Each structure stands twice: as structure tokens, then as C-alpha cells.
């Protein structure tokens, strides 16, 4: 995790590394606030580094490391409120905002940072692939609250579709990565494994990116993160009408919550999504609560074993713990 530690002054770097003490695989976030203890959020708990309270000089050091001493180079990212760094890690920023006619022009006096640790969990989507593939891939919606594992899951699903799995041949995949979270690209180069036949449009608005990729890359499957606006939905409909399969994520807790959003009405009325994967808020991200078909029937096969028993079947359909991927 040297790409993360290098952001901090030496004293803070040593304190963070010492406190984590080899637990990087469990770390979700490092939250940095001026004049407050550094906060570490792990899968199961959070911890303070009370011996460290960063000052303004420390904040300037981190911003210079992020921007490579040129805030001008980060102008677009600063307006969005986040920066993607090497390794695909995303740094959220907050502080004083400058606006012009109600539009954010710049983020200045950065005093709060949230470093979200990017994690590849290769193979985490394998248990759900038989649900979203029946002779062909189906339009699939991944639904969950923040930090429930949606992006990690759709990233691995993209990798499997683009590489092939279980005798299913690889397909051409186009990823529209508006927030650089799926691929974690740096200067256009993905930092995560997305498979052999995946192409990425990084930092591009979703609606425009979908149409650009359909015209230029002729994908079989389109992958999009965090849809929601009317323009997103319209672009999805155009992609589907063009014969492209779509897989996307959306913020939400339940199917009924989504159906209350006017922008999504057409998707449910026309039963666009043949599979809807609902994630459960859990200390371990990636726990699946339901998988619905287009008739809103839960088709997720629950374990036929007692809790903590191992299903030793040789079948690819793993019944035990299939809802924890």
C-alpha cells in the first residue's frame, strides 16, 4: 500500500502503518481531518490514532502529493470532490467551495479527506454468474447502499464476462467509468483486472459515454456504475434498443425504494432488468440478500445446510453461503 502511505508526512505515515499493523486487507477507509485524530475504518470496527492530529502543514503536504504540486492539473477532479490515485484508490475531498451562479467552480482550503481503499476480490462474482447467464447474459441491476460491495461485484462480473468462465466464452465488454471506481484508471490505464476483452471510457459522463462506446467499440455487454438520472435511463434504453446487454449499479436499499423514483419507472414498467441483485448492509461487504427476476420473484437459492456447514457438492452452483460472496 505504498501508493497510499506516500501521501502522508513521515510521522503520520509511520503512525498509520504501525496502527494498521498488517491489516490492510481489512481496511476500508482512512479519514483525515485537520486538528482531529486520524480515523481508520476496518470491516468490523473503527479505530482512532489519537496520538496524531494533523495540522495545516500536514494537509498541504497531502494535497501536494495528490496533485504532484500542481492543483491546476486536478481542476476537474476538485470540482467533482474526489481524486483517483495509483492502485485505483479514491480520495474524497471536502473543505471550502467556491461557486459561481450556484455552480461549483473550485474546491479550496481542503481540510477533510477520505481515502477509500480499492480492493479487488477476484472471483467474488463467480457464484452469481449462473443467475445472470441463461444461454445469454441478462440485463442486470445491482442494488445496495454505499459500501455494500456493488462496485466490487460488478467489477468482477465485468472481468468474468470479458474473460469467460465455466465454459462460457468471453464477450466484448465496454465499461463507462464516470467516477473511476470500476477500473480505477490512471491516465486512461485501468489499475484493476477487468478481463481480456474489456474496454474502458474513463471519467466520462454516463449518458454520453454509453453512446460513444456503442458507436466506437461495438460491445456485447455495457457496464455502468451508479445510474439514476433521467439522462442515464434514456441512454440505457437506447443501448438496450441497440441490442446491447447492460449491467449497472444503483444506490438503494430495497426494490420498493427504487420503484418510488420517477426516473426509473420506465425500467420497471417494461421489465428491462431480468435480474435485480439486492445487497445487504453488513460488516462484510458483498453479502447478497435477494436476486429477483423480472417478475420480482426471489430466485436466490438459500443454503440447504445448517449454518457454517460446508456443502461439498461438486456442482458449480454453490448452495452454502451463496448469499455471502
Image (cartoon, rainbow, N blue to C red):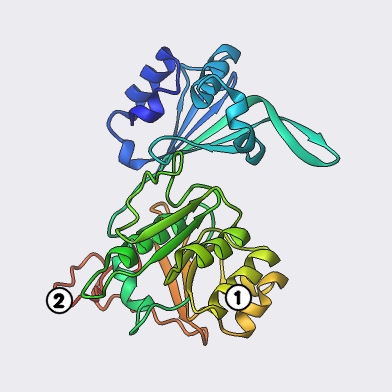
Alpha carbon distance from label 2 to label 1: 40 Å
The residue at which mark 1 appears reads as 237
Q: Tell whether label 1 touches label 2 (CB within 8 Å).
A: no
* Residue 313: numbered disc: 2
* Residue 262: numbered disc: none
Extreme-right residue of the structure? 101
In the rendered structure, the answer to whether residue 61 lies left or right of residue 56 reads: left
The nearer-to-camera label among 2 and 1 is 1
Q: Quadrant of residue 134?
A: bottom left
Residue at point 83%, 36% (across, down): 100
Q: Is residue 4 visible?
A: yes
In the rendered structure, the answer to whether residue 168 lies left or right of residue 194 reads: left
In the displayed structure, 35 sits above or below 122; it is above
In the displayed structure, 186 sits above or below 250; it is above
Mark 2 or mark 1: which comes first in sequence? 1
Q: Position of residue 284 (x, y in %)?
A: 38, 53
Amino acid at each position: 500500500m505504498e501508493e497510499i502511505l506516500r501521501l502522508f508526512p513521515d510521522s503520520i505515515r509511520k503512525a498509520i502503518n504501525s496502527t494498521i499493523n498488517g491489516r490492510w486487507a481489512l481496511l476500508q477507509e482512512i479519514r483525515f481531518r485537520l486538528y482531529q485524530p486520524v480515523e481508520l475504518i476496518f470491516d468490523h470496527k473503527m479505530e482512532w490514532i489519537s496520538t496524531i492530529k494533523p495540522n495545516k502543514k500536514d494537509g498541504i503536504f497531502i494535497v501536494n502529493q495528490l496533485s504532484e504540486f500542481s492543483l491546476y492539473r486536478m481542476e476537474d477532479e476538485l470540482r467533482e470532490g474526489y481524486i483517483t490515485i495509483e492502485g485505483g484508490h479514491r480520495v474524497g475531498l471536502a473543505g471550502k467551495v467556491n461557486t459561481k451562479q450556484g455552480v461549483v467552480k473550485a474546491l479550496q482550503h481542503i481540510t477533510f479527506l477520505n481515502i477509500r481503499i480499492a480492493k479487488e476480490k477476484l472471483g467474488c462474482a463467480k457464484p452469481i454468474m449462473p443467475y445472470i447467464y441463461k444461454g445469454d447474459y441478462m440485463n442486470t441491476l445491482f442494488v445496495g447502499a454505499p459500501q455494500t460491495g456493488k462496485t466490487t461485484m460488478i467489477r468482477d462480473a465485468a472481468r468474468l464476462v470479458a474473460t469467460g468462465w465455466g465454459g462460457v466464452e468471453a464477450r466484448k465488454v465496454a465499461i463507462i467509468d464516470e467516477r473511476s471506481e470500476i477500473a480505477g484508471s490512471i491516465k486512461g490505464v485501468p489499475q484493476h483486472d477487468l478481463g481480456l476483452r474489456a474496454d474502458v471510457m474513463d471519467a466520462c459522463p454516463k449518458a454520453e459515454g454509453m453512446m460513444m462506446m456503442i458507436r466506437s467499440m461495438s460491445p456485447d455487454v455495457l457496464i455502468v456504475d451508479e445510474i439514476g438520472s433521467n439522462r442515464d435511463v434514456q441512454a440505457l434504453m437506447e443501448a438496450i434498443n441497440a441490442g446491447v446487454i447492460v449491467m449497472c449499479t444503483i444506490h438503494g436499499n430495497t426494490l420498493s425504494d427504487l420503484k418510488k423514483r420517477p426516473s426509473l419507472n420506465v425500467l420497471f414498467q417494461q421489465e428491462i432488468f431480468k435480474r435485480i441483485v439486492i445487497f445487504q448492509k453488513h460488516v462484510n461487504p458483498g453479502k447478497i440478500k435477494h436476486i429477483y427476476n423480472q417478475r420480482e420473484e426471489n430466485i436466490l437459492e438459500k443454503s440447504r445446510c445448517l449454518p457454517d456447514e460446508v456443502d461439498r457438492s461438486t456442482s458449480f452452483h454453490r448452495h452454502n453461503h451463496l448469499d455471502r460472496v
